[in-house]
Image: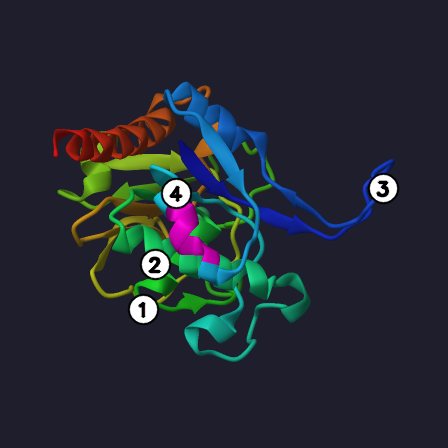
Amino acid sequence: MIGISSNLLSKKIPKAITDKRYHLSVDYVKALTQAGAISCMLPILSPEDAKQVISEIDGLVLSGGNDISPVVYGQLFNGTKEDETVIERDLYEISLCKEALRQKKPILGVCRGAQLLNVVLGGTLTQDISADTLINHIQEGKPTEASHQASIIPNSQLAHILNQNTVAVNSYHHQAIQKVGKKAVVNCVSEDGVVEGIEYTGHSFALGVQWHPEIMASKEEAMASLFTYFVNETKKKNLETEAI
Ligand SMILES: [Mn+2]
């Protein structure tokens, strides 16, 4: 069972009785189903609950969504809008991510999730890259289609998973990884130098990509292989446990 972190929606939905809802794009669920896993959506609980939640799942997907509050990586608001952050989500996901690393449960971070993994490992983010980049990282075309190229760092886990030197990715971010966290390395960089992926160098699988592979996974084999690899890692852990 894979747990997928969720967003908090506070907008009024037509015909819904209440305004506040946890929500998640169905593409994450579909990509994991295609990779042979069943999944569940993780509502935003208290950080103290993370230990038990992680103990009950085999792997964690940190999903995309709103900007992470710079407060959690020691910066002031400088490009991130405070009203677009959800501090309870940040604090809960930080706790989930730390606990998954501690319990050696595989982690796949998508977009915000990659940034969150970096923050947990002690890294920082650039709060607004739009003024400094040569390509538009908030694409205008369809989300199922790639909008920019990125180079995969040779000998990285990502290079091993995708088995290619470059990758065409979709792009929906105005923030990016700045200082890379401890025990993490960059595994993918866009043509204009923006970090497009990181991976953990410790004793469990934790990898984050800045794009949205779940939206492309039904059509693109490379994107599907990210989920397949991640799901296989979660099964490996079970086999190890069963062998004991
Ligand atoms: Mn991008």
Disc sitting over residue 122 in the figure? 1
The tag earlier along the polypeptide, 4 or 1, is 4
> CA–CA distance between discs 4 and 1?
19 Å
The tag earlier along the polypeptide, 1 or 2, is 2
Instruction: Assess whether residue 86 is covered by the magenta stretch.
Output: no
The tag earlier along the polypeptide, 3 or 2, is 3
Residue 215, compared with residue 42, is above or below; it is above
Which residue, given by chain and number where applicable, does mark 2 sit on?
Answer: 98
Q: Is residue 241 left or right of residue 208?
A: left
User: Is the C-beta separation of discs 4 and 2 under 8 Å?
Assistant: no
Which residue, given by chain and number where applicable, does mark 4 sit on?
Answer: 60
Type of residue at label 3?
A: Ile
Which residue, given by chain and number where applicable, does mark 3 sit on?
Answer: 17
> CA–CA distance between discs 1 and 2?
11 Å
Seen at 53% across and 60% down, the residue is 46
First to last magenta residue range: 49-54
Type of residue at label 4?
A: Leu
The tag earlier along the polypeptide, 4 or 2, is 4
- Residue 212: x and y in percent read 47, 39
Between residue 182 and residue 81, name the one nearer to us: 182
